[in-house]
Amino acid sequence: MASGGLGYSLPASIGVALARPGRRIVALIGDGSAMYCIQAIWTAAQRRLPITFVIMNNSGYGAMRAFSQLMQAHRPPGIDLPGLDFVALARGHGCPGRRITDVADLDRCLAEALASGGPALVDIAVDDATTDLFNHPR
C-alpha cells in the first residue's frame, strides 16, 4: 500500500489470520497509525490469533512530519505523540507486549513473539528524525 489507510494493518491482520488459520501473521505499523485501530489487538487476544504486532514507535506521525516539512509548515500541532505505552495498551487488551530500545534485543524479542501461540506485540523505539518521504524523482 503506497498511501492512505491509517491503521489498516491491524484490522487487516485479523482478517488474514481468520482467512488463513494456522499461519503466523506479522502486522507492521507506525505508532500514530496504530492508534486508529488499536482495538484490533483485543480481537486478536480474544480469538487467540497468531499475530505479531510490530509497532515502529517514533513518538508521532512520521509521515505528517515529513509532509509538514514539504509544505513548509513549522511545528504544526498534533503531530507528536509522546508517552504512548503500547505494551500497557496491549496488556490491557489481553495481549503480551515488549518494548525494544536496544537493537541488540530485537532478534530475540521478535523470535519469542513469533514463537508464541497467540498474539504478541513488539514496540520498537525508532529515531523520530523525519526522512524525506515525499521528495523522490519522477
Image (tube, grey):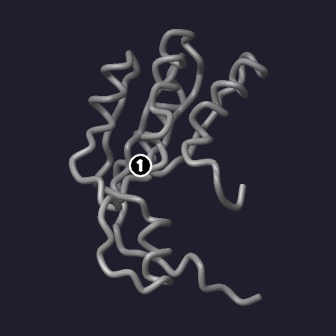
Q: Nearer the viewer, residue 25 or 11?
A: 11
Residue beneath the point at 41% across and 39% down: 122
Which residue carries the number 1 mark? 31
Q: Quadrant of the C terminus?
A: bottom right
Residue 118 location (% of width, % of height):
52, 18
Q: How many marks?
A: 1
Q: Quadrant of residue 104?
A: bottom left
Looking at the rendered structure, the kind of residue marked 1 is: Asp
Q: Quadrant of residue 13?
A: top right
Residue beneath the point at 44% across and 52% down: 56
Residue 7 location (% of width, % of height):
55, 42
- Farthest residue in the bottom direction? 137
Q: Nearer the viewer, residue 26 or 5?
A: 5
Q: For mark 1, does the 10 Å Cα neighbourhood hold few (<14), some (14 to 19), or many (20 or more) residues?
A: many
- Farthest residue in the left direction? 83
Residue beneath the point at 78% across and 20% down: 19
Residue 82 location (% of width, % of height):
23, 53
Residue 42 location (% of width, % of height):
46, 19
Q: Quadrant of the N terminus?
A: bottom right
Q: Decide: is 113 above or below 21.
A: below
Q: For this view, does 44 lie left or right of residue 79?
A: right
Q: Secondary structure at mark 1?
A: helix
Q: For this view, does 81 lie left or right of residue 18?
A: left
Residue beneath the point at 26% across and 39% down: 85
Q: Nearer the viewer, residue 5 or 77?
A: 77
